[in-house]
Structure formats: structure tokens, C-alpha cells
Image: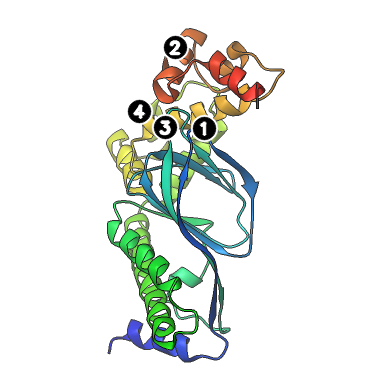
Amino acid sequence: MNNIEKELLALFADPAYGITLKTIRRIRFPANYRFESHAHPETEINYINSGCCMMEVEGQVIPLKRGSCIMVNPYKKHLFMVDVSKSCAITQLIYQAALPGQIPDCLPCFKGESVCHVFQDCEELCGLLESIQRGYKKIRDNCYAKAQFDFTMLQLFAMLSGCIEEENRLMDGCRGKLEEALKKIHGSLEEEINLEELAGELGISSRYLRKLFAERFGIGCSQYITMLRIAKAKEYLRDWDKGVTEASALAGFNSPQYFCRVFRRHTGMTPTEYKNLKNED
């Protein structure tokens, strides 16, 4: 028995340990769905089965596509937005863990040191979430099904901890650079952002900068900036007082014409159509 197995079984045997499931389900959201900013004491895991969406966690915008998974730690403010042009399906698990006072370092899924964790290409995790969903339906008055469910949850914690360790390993040498890049991008969204200049300010190559974004978000730096600007433009267009030209400038597009082309390519409608749609809600 290795150390992680020992720690998981010790946790399971501890009287202070307990898991309360709030929800485990597969959900299909319609295009243009939005769940406003909120926070809760539970851990929330969303695996993207199809489509594209975006979450904003404590002010950080995170694009998510099919095969991506995000784990939002307790009490972190987050909102959820689905792409305007098509629906999105996710497998969602929300749970609250009662834990003993001391958590071993080999189980970082319980540490909550980051606001969230993002994993790419994690189909195995999706399969485990589906097993949890099936098992949870069978546990009523069935001790064997309850035991199977409990051990499947331990499998989940082992897998999440492994994913977080891998995420930390990949990010150890570049976490500061990526965080600095995100800070600069968010702080200068209204201005033109030159990737070569941005990379130079960080002391890295533009190729390496693109690699950091691909490893963290599954997309390139330019794509991230465009998606962020589109998300910000949607916020401005929701405001009755702001027109398309003003929303375009505030979101960092150099001309309303270019903004309209990019907006339509990403959403399937013009900014005016989107604004009218929101004002009809």
C-alpha cells in the first residue's frame, strides 16, 4: 500500500470525515445561458461534455471547451456563461467535505489554496463523475451500494489530487509569468496588446507565452484575449446606456467594423442583435 492509499484510507476512517453531495447531474444549457455571480460553501466541479462556455472565478475569466474540467473551491465567487451561438452540456458535481484538522500534502484537492483548478483533456475524470452519478442513485438503504459510492468518491479525490499535482508541476516554473501576463492583459484590455511586447516585458519569448496559455486554458494567448474582449463586450452591451461603438472601444477593439465581424464570428449574431436580445429579456 503506497502513501496516498494509506492517507485516503486514514481519512475515510477518521470520524470527522464526511461527504455531503448537493448535486451530481448532467445538464444541457441553452445558448446564451448565464448564471450570475455567486458563491457557496461547497466544492463545484464542471466537466464540459459538449459546446463552449466561460466561467469567471474571482475576476479571472476562464474559457472552457469540450474535454475541459474546472474545480472551483468553496466560497469563491464565480459566474457561468454559455456561448451565444450554441448550447453546452456539462457534468456537474457539487459536494461539501467535512475534514479532520490536518490534511496531508499528498491530497491537495482538499487544500483550497487556489481559487480554482483547470484540467484539459480529462475524459477519465468524466467517466468517474458518471460512475458517481450512477452509484449515488443506488445508495438508499443499500449498504453495499453506499460502500461502493464512498470508495468511488475516494477514487475521485485521488484523481483530482493527481491532476492538481500535475498542474502544479507544469506551472511551477511559469506560474509567476502567467499570473503577471494575466494581470497585464486584464489591466490593459482597452489598449492594443502586442504579444511580442508583452512577452518581452515578462522576459520570455512569445512562443513560450503561447505555450503557457495552451497548458493552462487549452487555447492560445491571442484566442484568450479575443474571448476575454468578447465577454467584456457582452457585459457592456447588456447595459442600456452603452451603444455598439462604445462597447467596442471599452472592450479593446480598434474599430466598430472589426468588432462586429469578430463578435459575429464568435457568437453567430451582430452586436446589435445581441443587445436587442438582452433588452427583450
Q: Residue furthest top?
A: 257
Classify residue 220 by image quadrant.
top left
Q: Residue furthest front?
A: 141
Which of the labelled discs sits on residue 196, or is there none? 4
The answer to whether 254 appears left or right of 276 in the picture is: left
- Which residue is disc 1 drawn over? 32
Which of the labelled discs sits on residue 86, or is there none? 3
Secondary structure under the numbered disc 1 in the rendered image:
loop
Secondary structure under the numbered disc 4 in the rendered image:
helix
The residue mark sitting in front, 4 or 1, is 1
Identified by mark 2, the residue type is Tyr
Percent position (x, y) of residue 2? 28, 86
Distance between mark 2 and mark 3 Cα atoms:
22 Å
Q: Is residue 93 visible?
A: no
Percent position (x, y) of residue 64? 41, 43
The residue mark sitting in front, 2 or 4, is 2
Are dots 2 and 3 in contact, CB under 8 Å? no
Distance between mark 2 and mark 4 Cα atoms:
22 Å
Of pointers 3 and 4, the one earlier in the residue sequence: 3
Residue at 29% in and 56% down: 123
Secondary structure under the numbered disc 2 in the rendered image:
helix
Residue at 54% in and 56% down: 115
